[in-house]
Amino acid sequence: MISRCRSCRLGLVVLALGCSKPTTSPGSQSSAPAHAAEPNPAHDGHHHAHHHRFDDAEAWAKQFDDPSRDAWQRPEAVLDHLHLASDAHVADLGAGTGYFTVRIARRVPSGKVLANDVEPDMVRYLGERAAKEGLTNVVPVQGTPSDPALPEAVDVAFMCNVYHHIEDRSGYFQRVGALLRPGGRLVVIDFEKDAPEDAPGPPPAMRVARETLVSELTAVGFELVRSDTELLPHQYIVELRWAP
Ligand SMILES: C[S@@+](CC[C@H](N)C(=O)[O-])C[C@H]1O[C@@H](n2cnc3c(N)ncnc32)[C@H](O)[C@@H]1O
């Protein structure tokens, strides 16, 4: 509960992005997902079940889309950094409730966003959110834990705060690589391994160091284009091309 929160309001979003599951759902006695600040058993050995833990999109939306997240996630600065062409086709892999999806969609008015998630309730929510926000260039895509299952190739495969959830990263990212158009990029944002204990994101044991991520992805056929550790206070941004 809130009394167990390590820091403050930021901590609610923080731990949500570290992915502790809301323990109540909207419509039940307490619909507020403030208990996201509770300790996170899912990080203590239940990795195999990650894809089952995001099954209440409305509850997660209160956390993923909490405006206080913008202060450290800096979504517009991130998207400026990526220089997306207005007609780019972008996959938002593990899009969740669409925090980045809707912002990307506005930046690619003559392009498209394939908003992928492994969790059916997130996919449902993404479609409803896009319709509500009048974003006709968003296509929700149901993935599986090992396959993004994109219906077509993209210019940019974007992934924020999801990498540490992927179990068979080797197989998954080979599929992603094969789904990049010539000249396409994979962009991965995740939490620094050595971020302070009370920083946003999953507990340190679950974070993947930037060097580890780069070596895993180069091992499956990607080549590092650039990486940034300055733009965001607690996360790196790594950009790679497919060069198998
Ligand atoms: C912490 S949330 C991040 C959501 C969103 N990217 C954001 O930044 O707000 C992690 C999301 O990744 C999804 N996910 C986990 N494993 C996945 C996989 N193998 N393929 C696609 N999505 C996955 C979860 O269902 C969840 O929606």
Image (spheres, grey):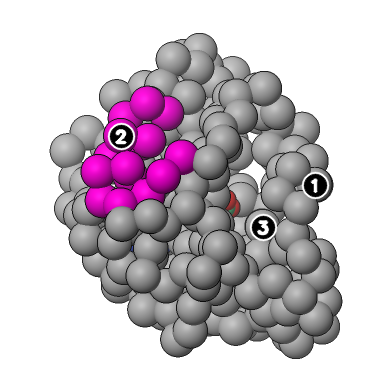
Callout 3 amino acid: Phe
Q: Is mark 3 within 8 Å of ligand 1?
A: yes
Which image quadrant for residue 58? bottom right
CA distance for labels 3 and 1:
13 Å
Label 1 vs 2, first from the N-terminus? 1
120 sits to left or right of 9: left
User: What span is colored magenta in the figure?
Assistant: 210-224
Residue at the spot 25% in from the left edge and 66% down from the top edge: 146
* Element at label 3: helix
Front residue of 103/228: it is: 228
> Ligand 1 is found in which quarter of the picture?
bottom left
Residue located beneath label 2 in the image = 215
Q: Position of residue 31 (x, y in %)?
A: 56, 57
Q: Nearer the viewer, residue 164 or 212?
A: 212
Q: Secondary structure at mark 2?
A: helix
Q: Can residue 181 be seen at all in this image of the molecule?
A: yes
Does label 3 or label 1 sit earlier along the sequence? 1
Cα–Cα gap, marks 1 and 2: 26 Å
Q: Which residue is mark 3?
A: 100
Q: Secondary structure at mark 1?
A: helix
Residue 223 falls within the magenta-colored stretch: yes
Residue 80 tag number:
1
Q: Nearer the viewer, mark 1 or mark 2?
A: 2
Q: Residue at x 30, y 34 (%)?
A: 215
Q: Position of residue 244 (x, y in %)?
A: 31, 57
- The residue under the point 48% across, 84% down is 152
Q: Nearer the viewer, mark 3 or mark 1?
A: 1
Would residue 64 appear left or right of 46 to someone viewing this image?
right
Amino acid found under the numbered disc labelled 2: Ser
Q: Quadrant of residue 237?
A: top right
Q: Is residue 60 above or below residue 141?
A: above
Q: Dominant secondary structure of the magenta stretch? A: helix
